[in-house]
Image (cartoon, rainbow, N blue to C red):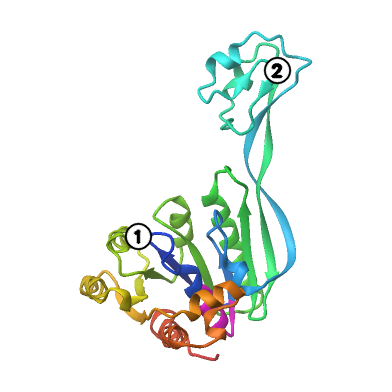
């Protein structure tokens, strides 16, 4: 069975239009599985109007729970807890980091470490194909593990349904979730805007792509709001990455966002540019024929 090609859409910083581009790719696709790996702020479902098919808990951490009937109020837990979460007979769940020290030192064994639900992950259907997405609860960690999980499920669906492509809306930045979204990816499409901060962060995410040996391609969003900075991005391209398209500023994009639909379903200057970029993604990046 042929392995599906996974294209991860990334950005060095938030707010560059990454999810808008990923949603447009999904709208233009004909044979893909979609994956929202931005589990800390998953937005792809807001644009693809999914119908939920499955919901599963994500359990990736433990927290301390105290049995007041066993507590002798010795205060040792309060004295040793570095996160100021433990009190005699009580644990502050929001402050507890799950290190387990209090449970190990409690003389009467009144404190127990228990697994907690850190979030939810979902399998949904959309008009264009299956969507795997997730929601991490506020303040919960292990987002890298949740990213790996949703990508794994998306790959399983793609194999089972013989779909040739996975389109992943990745997280912004360069942290653990980005690293988890890049492993075994076919290529990364980096969405950058022509601002100095975006150019700086583009270089940082490029370094992560290089470290994992993932070929990088760049899309300049709203290139015409500062053409000098757009040229600076193009001048950076070469062996490190290739610019495969430029998207003009278009008021149809925020209108589409307000309506909860991909911009390519409405048309306009940005939509036409994204369609050309999508052809480039299929051919040069994914190496697939266009059957849309």
- The residue beneath circle 2 is 89
**Magenta: main secondary structure:** helix
Q: Secondary structure at mark 2?
A: loop
Q: At 64% from the left edge and 78% from the top edge, which residue is drawn?
A: 129
Numbered disc total: 2
* Nearer-the-camera pick, 265 or 258: 258
Q: Quadrant of residue 2?
A: bottom right
Q: Secondary structure at mark 1?
A: helix
Q: Position of residue 282 (x, y in %)?
A: 45, 84
Residue 98 highlighted magenta (yes or no): no
Q: At 47% from the left edge and 85% from the top edge, which residue is drawn?
A: 271
Numbered tag placed on residue 205 in the rendering: 1
Say whether disc 2 or disc 1 marks the residue closer to the N-terminus: 2
Query: Is any atom of residue 157 visible in this view?
Result: yes
Numbered tag placed on residue 38 in the rendering: none
Q: Position of residue 120 (x, y in %)?
A: 67, 53
* Nearer-the-camera pick, 12 or 158: 12
* Nearer-the-camera pick, 142 or 92: 92
Position of the C terminus by quadrant: bottom right
Report the magenta residues as a range.
Answer: 22-32
Residue 111 against residue 58 in the figure, above or below: above
Q: CA distance from mark 2 to mark 1?
A: 46 Å
Whether residue 66 sits left or right of residue 246 in the image: it is right
Q: Position of residue 176 (x, y in %)?
A: 45, 50
Whether residue 200 sits left or right of residue 155 in the image: it is left
Q: At 46% from the left edge and 79% from the top edge, which residue is drawn?
A: 251
Residue 110 against residue 241 in the figure, above or below: above
Query: Is any atom of residue 165 visible in this view?
Result: no
Q: At 42% from the left edge and 88% from the top edge, which residue is drawn?
A: 276
Position of the N terminus by quadrant: bottom right
């Amino acid at each position: 069975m042929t392995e599906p090609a996974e294209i991860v859409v990334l950005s060095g910083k938030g707010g560059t239009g990454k999810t808008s581009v990923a949603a447009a790719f999904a709208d233009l696709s004909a044979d893909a599985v979609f994956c929202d790996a931005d589990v800390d702020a998953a937005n792809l479902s807001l644009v693809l109007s999914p119908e939920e098919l499955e919901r599963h808990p994500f359990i990736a951490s433990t927290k301390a729970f105290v049995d007041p009937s066993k507590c002798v109020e010795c205060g040792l837990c309060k004295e040793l807890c570095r996160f100021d979460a433990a009190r005699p007979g009580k644990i502050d769940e929001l402050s507890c980091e799950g290190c387990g020290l209090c449970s190990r030192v409690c003389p009467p064994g009144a404190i127990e470490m228990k697994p907690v639900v850190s979030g939810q992950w979902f399998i949904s259907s959309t008009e264009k194909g299956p969507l795997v997405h997730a929601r991490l609860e506020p303040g919960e960690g292990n987002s890298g593990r949740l990213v790996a999980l949703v990508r794994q499920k998306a790959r399983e669906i793609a194999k089972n349904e013989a779909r040739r492509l996975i389109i992943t809306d990745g997280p912004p930045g360069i942290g653990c979730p980005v690293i988890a979204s890049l492993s075994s990816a076919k290529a990364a499409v980096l969405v950058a805007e022509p601002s100095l901060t975006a150019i700086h962060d583009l270089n940082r995410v490029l370094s992560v792509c290089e470290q994992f040996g993932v070929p990088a391609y760049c899309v300049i969003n709203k290139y015409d709001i500062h053409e000098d900075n757009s040229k600076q991005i193009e001048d950076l391209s070469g062996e490190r990455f290739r610019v495969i398209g430029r998207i003009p500023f278009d008021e149809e994009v925020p209108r589409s966002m307000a309506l909860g639909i991909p911009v390519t379903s409405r048309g306009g200057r940005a939509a036409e540019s994204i369609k050309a970029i999508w052809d480039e993604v299929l051919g040069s990046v994914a190496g697939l024929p266009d059957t849309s």
